[in-house]
Structures are given as C-alpha cells and as structure tokens.
Amino acid sequence: MEELKNCPICGSEKHSVFLTCTDHFLTKEKFTIVKCDKCGFTFVNPRPEQSQLAGYYESTEYISHSGTSKGIVNSVYKFIRNYTHKAKLKLVTKYAKGNKILDIGCGSGELLSLFRKIGWETLGIEPNQTAREFAVKQYCINVYEEAHLKEIDDGMMDVISMWHVLEHVSLLNERMQEVKRVLKDDGVLFIAVPNRISFDATHYGEFWAAFDVPRHLYHFTPETMGELIKKHGFAIVSFLPMKFDSFYVSMLSEKYKNGSSNLLKALYTGLKSNIKANSRRHDHSSMIYVIRKK
C-alpha cells in the first residue's frame, strides 16, 4: 500500500478520516477515504500501489470495458451511454474551434467513432488492452496505451476529454500537466467526474457506488475541482450536469446497500437527487466541467 503524505491539490500534510468504504464491486476489501483539513479534498489513503491497481479492474463485469448487455444494470448502462455519447458530441462541437480530439480513457471507442464519422481527427488513450483492441478492430480508430500520452506533440489537440477518468488517475497533477502541454492555447478540455456532495452521495453514504474504492482514488466537489483547475493554469468556462448518472449510480448503490437493485427506489432517489441539484445548480451526481487555459 502507498500512503500519500500531502494533499494532491493544496499540499497540506493535515488530513482526517472522512469515510471507510468497502470495495463492493470486486474484492470486499475496506479502504479509508481521508479529507484534507485545509482545502477539503477527499482521496483514498493509503491506496494500492500503482502497479497493483490494474488488478482491481480485472472482471468481465467491469462495464466500461465490457460490451455485455446481460442484466438490468448493464442494459441501463449501455442505453444511457449511447444517449450521452450523442449529447457529448453536441457539447464538444459547440465549444471546439478545431477538429482534433484526444479522448483519454476512451474505453471501447464508441464516442470517438461518432467524431470520426463527422470528419474529425481522433486519437484515444485506453489502459485496458481488451477495450483498446476492440476500439481499433471495430471502429478503425487510433487508440494507444497511457504511455503514448507523453509522445504527443505540444499544442497538438483542439479538444481533450476525460469522461469519468480523472478520479482513476494515480498521478493526478502529472496528468493535468500533460493535458495542458498537449492542448492548444485556444483548445478546450472536458472533464466529467462524480460529485461527492450530491444528494445521492449523501443518501447512500459508504454504499454510494461512485466512491468505487479503490478504482476511484479521488472524490471531487465543484470547489475542489475548481482548485485543481486553477492550480494548473486553467479556468472553468462552464459546468453542466450528467442527470442520468444519479439513476444509474442509485441502482448500483441500492444493490450494494440492500443486496438487490431496487429499480423503483433507485429511480426515486435519482429523481430526488436531480430535483435538489436543480435548486442548487451544481450539486448533481456527476458534473461536466468545460475548461480552457487562462
């Protein structure tokens, strides 16, 4: 296990136990989430060493790397994914000033294939070999291992996206530095992450599926995301909700808490989460941050 001495965002050495969570998805191990006493950022500490983390994804049930539609949760995930990919395409084209996109954590390549169909130059980074090979074979797009990120030329990309990826990245600040290097000065960065102060997060507590320890190493709020972005010379242009996430996460959370994915209870909790977030503007289950260089 690796223990972080300093907060990844503000560098403070002072942090307190925030929550103890179980890896409900795979190993049933318990992990501690700590909260920085200075900036409020929450992160898993101690955590598996970087070389060990891949083992926590080794399951055919890990949906983002799987094409299966077996079971209600997987079916719902695929339905939502197909819908949201089209929404992401519309969002990106609204803000982009060019047509070169790098999708980090592109999974099996469905989103990049949509961009390719409308004539964009596409590049993907995906650490999972099975997903990477599927994307190359199925969609004929260029997808590489994470090490390839360092080989991309400075200022090459008009758009960089990380959809539910940043919370998984071991070297958080190094990744933000690499992204800034590769992005054009007038480029746009899209980051989507779960929001630990959403209603569904509070409602489910340690059973909230988006804690997903230890695969999710960091647990952001709009405030701590703002601090990370500012630290690396970026500014948030806009933020938008991912309203479907509250329903999907609630389904998984019901399963973790009660042993079954109670659809009605999950729908009710997801709807309540969205309603409460609408009144506060930025407390949805997951948030998209639209970001540019300062």
Image: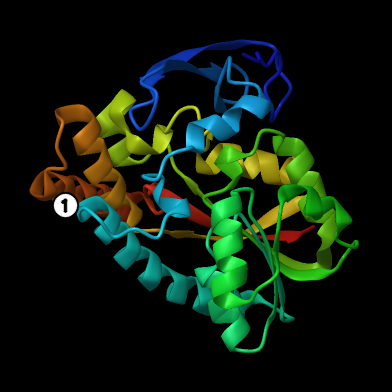
Direction from residue 263 to residue 273 in the image, left or right: right
Report whether 107 appears left or right of 148: left
**Viewer-proximal residue, 89 or 220?**
89
Asked if 63 appears above or below 221 in the picture, the reply is below
- The spot of residue 251 in percent (x, y) is 22, 45
Give the class, few, some or many, for how many residues have Cα within 10 Å of label 1's Cα (few <14, many ≥20). some
Vertical order, 274 against 100 (above or below): above
Could you say where residue 41 lies in the image, as x and y percent from the top left? 57, 28
| Left or right: residue 262 compared with residue 220 | left
> From the image, which quarter does the N terminus lie in?
top right
Percent position of residue 42, x then y: 53, 26
User: Measured from the top left, where is residue 155 in percent x and y?
Assistant: 87, 65
Q: Secondary structure at mark 1?
A: helix
Q: Nearer the viewer, residue 5 or 152?
A: 152
Residue plotted at (41% across, 17% down): 29
Q: Is residue 264 above or below residue 69?
A: above
Q: Residue 215: tell me if it is visible.
A: no
| Residue at the farthest right position | 154
Colouring used for the render: rainbow
Q: Quadrant of residue 281?
A: bottom left
Q: Residue at x 40, y 58 (%)?
A: 242
Q: Which residue is mark 1?
A: 267
Q: Quadrant of residue 27?
A: top left
